Image (tube, rainbow, N blue to C red):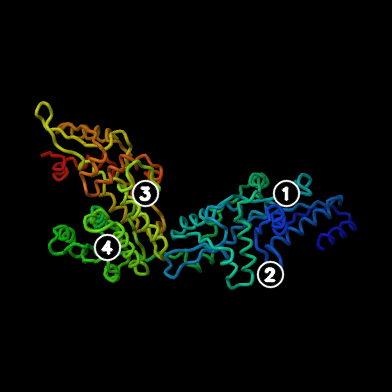
Amino acid sequence: QWFKTLQEVHQEDKLPRTVVFSGRDNVQELARKKYEQTGNVWIEPLDDGSVVPHYSAKGKGGEEGLKLLQNTPGLNLIQLTMPFFYSNFLAFFCPLPNDGRTQWELSGCFGSGDTKIDMMAVTDLGALVVNVMNQAEKYKGQILRVASERISMNEIAKEFSDLFGKDVVYNPLLPKELAALEFPSAPAMAQMCQFLGDSRELQHDLELTAELMKPRKLANFETWLLTHSDSTAFSRVGLDRDAPELTKICVFGALSPQGKSVVKGLLADVRKSYTIRCTTRRDLDTNPDVQELIALDPQRVSFVQADFDDIDSCTNAVQDMDGAFLVADLQESLKTTDLETEERHVKNIIDACEGRVRHLIFSTMESSEAVNTDLPEKELLEFSPKARAAAYARSKSLSVTFVLVPCYSEVFFDMMEVRKDDAGQDKLVMKVPGGQEDAKVMVMSVEELGPCVANIFDSYECFAGHEIGLVTDFVTAHEVKSMLNDVFSEDIAVETESVETKEWVEARDTYMRDLGQLFAGLSHSKAVTSRHSLAKTYQLVPNVRSLRRWVEQNRDNPTFREKLGLR
């Protein structure tokens, strides 16, 4: 009716006019055509038979208007078909927090979180419409499908996380779940999300939109979010609130190399004074490692004995704690328990942390299913239980950072033995499994983990939900040999020797068995190496030590020299 009135007025006054109509897709017609082509219902109609009525009505109206006015001299009609607007994230699609405010969810039925959706800022329409009107002769009678970018909900969630330092995730709903929400437009909203999230050929023209916007640039979601970061919508859901400081940390696996490093790193942090509660399954009175850690600072370090089979014991360990660090030293108990039991222990600890600590840092590993290796499956037992436990942690209402630790630099020195050369002089021989002297291996000194964990706890909301693959070097055994010959040139010569991988692994029943996997398979697996980042490691701890720097700083360390058989 509006277009008919426009036509009548124009015929009466004969004034030249350009009309830019803001339209949408006629989804009902698209759904009908798809049904005719496939025989399948694409989007389930509402009770009245409509499909995305707030889109389809505009779409059908625009189509009828273009037909009506196409032969009316002096009257130019141009339709802009709009995409999903960023401003929706200030309203229905604003991230909402869980009860503990440990995670914020972007809920919708757009399908996979990786589905790309056409979007733009509504504030760009003003300049866009002016430029279209200035080129009315070029675009009259056309439908221009405008958008500034094609972006996924996972990418949207990441932008929220990066800006506000909160754990923001996309929560994919089924259309029927969204339609069942208790507000009148929920069913139509569910249809809209289903339409926008469909991987269809009907896409908006990003190049045309950028051309129409010249000389200005279109806003993308990152810049839009930055300019709207002080919106009351985000304040109401707590995205802009500072996180409470964490000062009381429970360290599970405190007697492992990682656990000891974390205790030392927290004690060394000058930004705050941490109180550290360490847990162990071992006897507290007879274990010298327990007393050694307590002696670092008896006022701030304490130990409790925890039975990881008992959820109440795990709960008591984290009682009144702000945060927790968890390393599952699965190999520690290979002789006394199976890995499925150890996995259950880890899940008990995760359950104990849920609702009690504000943040958990979980040192985990890759899944063996994702790793290409020619080792027998039994040699990869440790990896999958840890990966499954990490997946379990992601399913809980718990703020978690996942840390992937590479091969310890210290392991290279456990691979060495002192021998005599032909002249009777001492030499160091590095035994390398599988003839893999030239395989690049990811390494970092376990000593560097403590400062990394301290920095994560200091800004824990920025790292919530993130996976951080730590690494300081990708080195070969030959490169390590050359480096050691440079650093210890006045003390001893270093050589490498290749041994059978199985023989090498079977000779060791500690965490060292994993090094055989690193050389034989994991060092070549993109599923592993792509998850470890030098850039992220140095961003987290700018003064983290490279392998060479770590060796040089320890050159005169008596304990270090003793490992190498030096005086």
Instruction: Give the Cα separation between the discs numbered 3 and 2.
Output: 49 Å
Apparent side of residue 488 relative to residue 62 in the rendered image (left or right): left
Q: Which mark is residue 47?
A: 2
> Counting residues from the N terminus, which is met first, the one under dot 3 or under dot 2?
2
Q: Quadrant of the C terminus?
A: top left
Q: Is residue 461 left or right of residue 326?
A: right
Specify the quadrant of the image occupied by residue 336. Answer: bottom left
Q: Position of residue 101 (x, y in %)?
A: 43, 67
Badge 2: residue crowd in 10 Å (few <14, some 14–19, many ≥20): few
Give the residue at mark 4: 274
Residue sitting at x 14%, y 36%: 418
Q: Residue 504 occupies which quadrant of the picture? A: top left
Mark 1 neighbour density, 10 Å: few (under 14) some (14–19) many (20 or more)? many
Q: Kindly report the distance in space between the C-alpha atoms of the residues bearing marks 2 and 1.
A: 39 Å
Provide residue 422's location: percent of width, then percent of height.
12, 26
> In front: mark 4 or mark 2?
2
Mark-to-mark CA distance, 4 and 2:
60 Å
Alpha-carbon distance for marks 1 and 4?
A: 61 Å
Badge 3 crowding class, 10 Å Cα cut-off, few under 14, some 14 to 19, many 20 or more, is many
* Label 4 element class: loop
- Element type at marker 3? helix
Looking at the rendered structure, the secondary structure element under dot 1 is: helix
- At label 4, which amino acid type do we have? Tyr
**Is the C-beta separation of discs 4 and 3 under 8 Å?**
no
